[in-house]
Image (tube, rainbow, N blue to C red):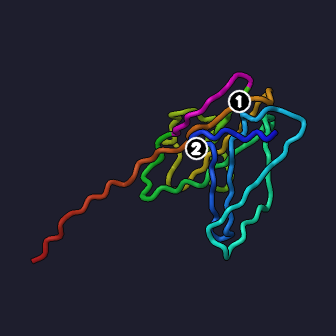
Amino acid sequence: TWQAPVRGFMETICAYTINSDETQCFTNMKVIDSSRYLQYHASFQSSDSAKTIALYDIDLVYGIHVLTGSALSIPIPPADLLGWKNIAIVSTLPENTTLVIDVVAPDGRVLISDVQNETSLEAIDPNDYPALQLRATLSTSDESITPDIDRWGLTWSVWNRSYLPIILN
């Protein structure tokens, strides 16, 4: 018998890539019972008879987490950067897991290691480092759980612009 995933709000996420004309979708399949085999059923429908829909591949990820992994943010180059302020991190850290976040320069050099929420960045010179990145190293000793990063980022101050009127005679 077919058992379809139950879709809650925002549990199916699709992204369309313009330059490759491809759409990728991700569905939460946690409600499907565990079994030895899995079948996948795809139905296609189009409102444009001049285009053919194609399924290129299917990737299935199931409940075993890799014991270690890492993530690297994109470079963060604020406009009008006066100075770096601090780290903003919201994360979930279950028992038997670790999460280490480092502040790195775009060339990969570690500037501050193992930062926490609200760690000060004021010692980092914005002239030497006008852009920064965050790198997370996640690990677990239990394949069924993993640490989560809900939100991470940097705060900074900007130049205060003052405009003086020009008086001409």
Asked whether 159 or 91 is in front, the reply is 91
- Answer left or right for 161 relative to 48: left
**Residue bearing the label numbered 2:** 10
Secondary structure mostly seen in magenta is: strand
**Residue bearing the label numbered 1:** 98
Residue at the image point whose x is 62% and y is 42% from the top: 11
Start and end of the magenta stretch?
A: 87-96
User: Are circles 1 and 2 on residues that touch, CB within 8 Å?
Assistant: no
Residue at the image point whose x is 61% and y is 54% from the top: 74
Residue at the image point whose x is 32% and y is 54% from the top: 160
Question: Given the current orientation, which residue lies at the most extreme top position?
Answer: 95
The answer to whether residue 153 is above or below residue 90 is below
Q: Position of residue 18 (x, y in %)?
A: 62, 68
Q: Position of residue 8 (x, y in %)?
A: 60, 39
Question: Residue 10: within the magenta?
Answer: no
The three-letter amino acid code for the residue at tag 2 is: Met
Question: Given the current orientation, which residue lies at the most extreme left position?
Answer: 169
Residue at the image point whose x is 75% and y is 33% from the top: 139
Location of the N terminus by quadrant is: top right
Return the mark for residue 151: none
Q: Secondary structure at mark 1?
A: strand
Name which quarter of the figure residue 137 lies in: top right
Asked whether 72 or 168 is in front, the reply is 72
Name which quarter of the figure residue 150 lies in: top right
Question: Given the current orientation, which residue lies at the most extreme right position?
Answer: 36
Asked whether 93 or 130 is in front, the reply is 93
Location of the C terminus by quadrant is: bottom left
The answer to whether residue 1 is above or below residue 40 is above
